[in-house]
Image (cartoon, coloured by chain):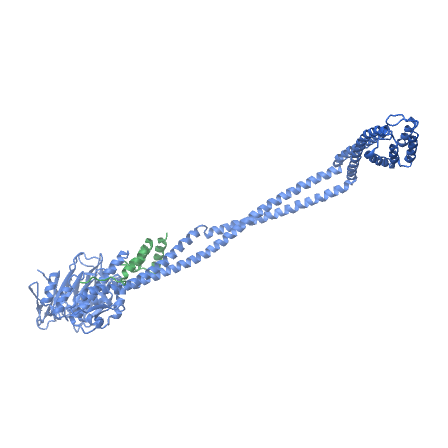
Chain colours: A blue, B green
Amino acid sequence: MIFHRLEISDFLVFKGKNTLTFPVTDDEPSMVVVLAPNNSGKTTIIKALRFLLYGTRPPGELCNHAAVDELRPGDRLNAWVGATVSVGNRSYTFRRRIDARKTKDGASEIENVILEQTQHDRGGDVYSPDQGEITRLLNSLVPEALFDFFYFQGETLADKLLQRSAHSSIGEALATLLHHKQWIRAAEAVDAVHAKLAEDIQDLSEVDRAYADQLKLVTQLEEKVAQSTRESAEFEQTTRDAAAEYESLGRQILDISTGKSFEDVAKKLDQIRKEFIDAGNQTGRVETEIAQTIGDSRGLPFFHDAFGAARAVLDSMQRENLLPADVVEGFLQRLLDHQRCLCGRSLNEHEAEARAAVEAYRTRALSQDVNAALLDLLDRLSPNVQRNFTKFAISAAQGLEDQLLRRKKLLLRSKELESQASTLEDEIKRSNHEEVLRLQTRQKEALRRKDDFGEKRRKTEIYLGQQKNMLREAKDVLTRLGGKGFGARFDKLTKARIQAGALAELIRETIACLKDSFQSILQQNLTLLYDANVTDGSKARVDPESLLPAIEQRGRVIHNVGGGQRQLLVLAHIVSLARLRQQLHAELTALGINMGKLDDQSFFLDSVFAPADKNYGERIAHFLPRKARQIVVLVASQQWEPWVSEPLSPHITRAFKCVLASENPPEGHTMKLNGKTIETYRPLKRGDASYSVLEEVPLQ
Amino acid sequence: MPAPSKGPEFKAEALRKIIAKQPLKTQELFAKIINLYAGFSITAQSEKELLGRVRREIEDSVK
């Protein structure tokens, strides 16, 4: 905060409107000197500042006695302290006004003290009661705890610092400067938002769960609807099939009742019967052929292998009484009567043995031993006869064998046809009534199926309708719950919560860093400003806890140091504080934080040379210039020694003097500035109340 | 005159590093929130209004 103007009107020792105007440029630091004899208002300026900034009333009457004296009892007096300051690029004009009234006993009675502000001062200031903005601004710009550091009375502050009585205030004041509490509030606000976001996410999750449950319900209903639709279709098909079967069975029953159903069977049976008769006829013909063959062969178709088969056939034929009587008898008779062999050779009359054998054969044939007798007969034939006979017999046997095979096949075919005919006859024999009953049973079953599945389908359709309604309602609820928007909302809140968590941590880290930076930045500057300017090799140390300065020599804190050295320490410390503000301001500005209030700070230094000897007075005078953008040095005439004035004078940008009006001139009421004599006394007639006024001193 | 030493206690550098590590949007959000509470141009706002603003800024920063 830089002062452009300070007005003190009828306040304490100052009578009338007294104005200090300060040259302010962007680039060059300024140094304003207020020269004053003792008790002329130097310290009053500091008191006026404290009153202006915080409303702190100094003890005693606030209103200027001389001004009050000029009023009549009951008259009103407006006393005030006002200022125009700049903070960053903004300018503020404000004043603290005292509404007072002169009482009968001549004193001033204060009725009201008001802080007033004005935004514009074109063509005269228009003030209105402060709405809080100026109060907040002042409290944040210059916390009262830091007042003594910026607008200080030399010895008082030195004592405070070295006796650690400022311990509790400075850290807090710096924290106030940085709006530490507001930073904490910011962190807490972010925490609160973080918690609220977590809560909202939880709520959303609850709603989301409801959404998920509803979605599950919709899915289940959709599955049920699909299942019921499938079942309904199946039931419909089954019903249709059963109906078709019912109708088919009905037609079958009708066919049976009209005999239509057995026409094919009867036709088939007729066919089989015909085939059976044919087979029997064929068999008969084959057997005739066999008999013919045997007859034609005169009973001798049998030889060796053929004989066995023939004999078996003959046996079988004989058992079945199929063998014609002449097969045996005729054969033998022909053999004997013709007197000729089967092979055509005439029988020799001499072959009585042969005839005897034939007789024996006949005998044995009659006794069923035909073949053995035949063989026996053959054995008795001559070799030629035997050969011819054998040749004839083989041919006859082969023909007979074919006939026997044909007969066998025909017999088998007859048997098969007989079986088929028997089956068909059974089928035909079965009662039509039973078939009708059987078909009716099946028809009944089909009807039952048709009805059952028809009913099932009907019920399923009803259930399906209900499920579809429920599904529609469930989908409506799902839509009301938000649908796809939830995912995005959830995602957004989650990201915001993570961001809030990170931000809160970042703010806290920053707060810790800033606080830790206080000590390190102060120490750097104090080392720079103090250590290089003392002559005893002592070093300045900043206590990390209290942030107060101490002087160390050979590693030990020393308390008994000279006034000038102490004053240098105080100045170095307050300049360090100013630089701390500037550095923090730069750091925070770089981070995008507009901490305009931490910008340049003006210093009002009262009695800064008071405790200093020539050595340190001169050092301080050399030290001060350009250490801050605005320094106002209040110097008593006793301290305005050449070793002070000479180093300072080249840097003074504007000068004022406190002119004391009193009966008697104060000590040292004339001073020299740039070779010119400055008079700071104005005589008053006896009895008049003394007062002071501020006047600018031309530098040239 | 000896130059001031920047020892490990110079926390401003640490602070710069901490901030620089953050995504740009977080840095901007950080500045906005601090300005809202502790900045130069603070205006009187109710706690509820401030919280609402903080939440909006945070949500906007993650859009």
Residue A347: where, in percent of width, then height? Answer: 90, 27
Which of the 4 quarters of the picture holds residue A624?
Answer: bottom left
Does residue A174 appear anywhere in the picture? Answer: yes
Q: Quadrant of the C terminus of chain A?
A: bottom left
Which of the 4 quarters of the picture holds residue A609?
Answer: bottom left
The one of A135 and A387 positioned closer to us in this rendering: A387
The one of A667 and A237 positioned closer to us in this rendering: A237
Which residue is drawn at the image coordinates 33% and 53% (left, top)?
A: B25
Which of the 4 quarters of the picture holds residue A43?
Answer: bottom left
Q: Quadrant of the N terminus of chain A?
A: bottom left
In the depicted structure, whether residue A393 falls above or below residue A476: above
Tally of marks? 0
Which residue is drawn at the image coordinates 68% and 41% (left, top)?
A: A245
Residue A187: where, in percent of width, then height? Answer: 34, 61
Does residue A47 appear anywhere in the picture? Answer: no
A405 relative to A444 in the view: left or right: right
A456 relative to A190 in the view: left or right: right
The one of A436 and B23 positioned closer to us in this rendering: B23
Residue A447: where, in percent of width, then height? Answer: 68, 44
Residue A510: where, in percent of width, then height? Answer: 31, 61
In the depicted structure, whether residue B55 falls above or below residue A68: above
